[in-house]
Image: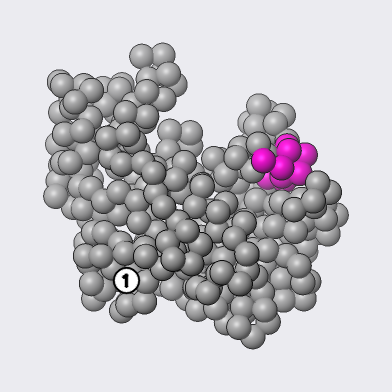
Amino acid sequence: MSQTERTLVLGSAGQIGTDLVEELRGIYGSDNVIATDIKDQPADFKAKGPFYMADVLDAQQVYDLIKKNNVKQVYLLAALLSAVAEQKPKAAWKLNMDGLFVMLDYCKENTGIKLFWPSSIAVFGPTTPRKLTPQQTIMEPSTVYGISKQAGERWCEYYNQKHQVDVRSIRYPGLISYKADPGGGTTDYAVNIFHDAVLKNTYDCFLKENTALPMMYMPDAIRATLELMNAPAEKIKTRSGYNLAGISFSPVELVEEIKKHIPSFTCTYTPDSRQQIADSWPSNIDDSVAQKEWGWKHEYDLKEMTSEMLRHIRIKYNK
């Protein structure tokens, strides 16, 4: 990407966007990465580089931003996540689908733009094989979020095959980060637990203790995203969404790891509506296709991630 070509991040204030904008600016320079969100952001964020308030459903507003800034890469991160989407199904469908069409249609008419759109393990459902879920398998999602992501994958494939749109996607597992607050997903417990461990020494978990789910520490997820976007187009054979495995663990396994650092830490379990969502998802993922096609390899294990998360959150709260 040349210096004058810019990158646009739509929905930059969420869990992925917060980390991704910082990483992209470190690579391409602050002025070459434009952050947008539907909500205004704090002054310290806006001081770090260009920021615009933008609604991804306002196609003209988005198109003007792309043209005015000579944007050649777009990361479309604006979405309603799994737990929130169950409460607002039609709003979630509208945002998650129409936002994608805004960008797919633009890329269809304007060649030379690379588009990243995040998929999720939510595309899988209760009938999917739960262990080592393969890249191609039964996909009958039972959540609003999963249905929108499954449909989105099909549209990405369609626009790539019919209109040669260079769209790339990852089926993110649960993401764990200390920088941004979680955004209403089913795996949020694995972020909240660290904050409560440091601040309260106890946590009440909304999933059952043995619910194993695929997770990933955010630095691995950001690295995967950038490696995928930088891979030569001819290597990217999968245009729906790549399986990405990180670390699979259950709440009780995470609690045991935290106790190695905070021996007096305690956890109770009060499953809520999110348990049903978790039960429909895989417990671990086979990502051999991503490994083969663009050389993906995760770095962080549960031990390293736990140690890093506690260290950063203690710094955050001066503990």
Q: Position of residue 314 (x, y in %)?
A: 37, 20
From what the image shows, is residue 127 above or below residue 169? below
Q: Is residue 297 magenta?
A: no
Q: Residues within 10 Å of mark 1 (few under 14, many from 20)?
A: some
User: Which residue in the rendered view is the most extreme toward the top?
Assistant: 318
Foreground residue among 178 and 29? 29
Q: Position of residue 14 (x, y in %)?
A: 52, 45
Assign a secondary structure to mark 1. loop
From what the image shows, is residue 101 above or below residue 36? below
Q: How many marks?
A: 1
Q: Is residue 80 left or right of residue 261?
A: right
Residue 90 appears in the rendering: no
The residue pinned by badge 1 equals 134
Q: Position of residue 127 (x, y in %)?
A: 23, 76
Q: Residue at x 40, y 59 (%)?
A: 244
Which region of the structure is painted magenta? 27-35
Foreground residue among 155 and 5? 5
Q: Which quadrant would residue 289 be assigned to in this image? A: bottom left
Residue 216 appears in the rendering: yes
Q: Residue at x 64, y 85 (%)?
A: 162
From what the image shows, is residue 149 above or below residue 284? below
Q: Residue at x 67, y 47 (%)?
A: 36
Q: Is residue 305 left or right of residue 225?
A: left
Q: Position of residue 187 (x, y in %)?
A: 32, 49
Q: Please state which amino acid type lies under the numbered disc 1.
A: Pro
Q: Which image quadrant: the C terminus?
A: top left
Q: Residue at x 68, y 63 (%)?
A: 114
Q: Is residue 171 left or right of residue 40?
A: left
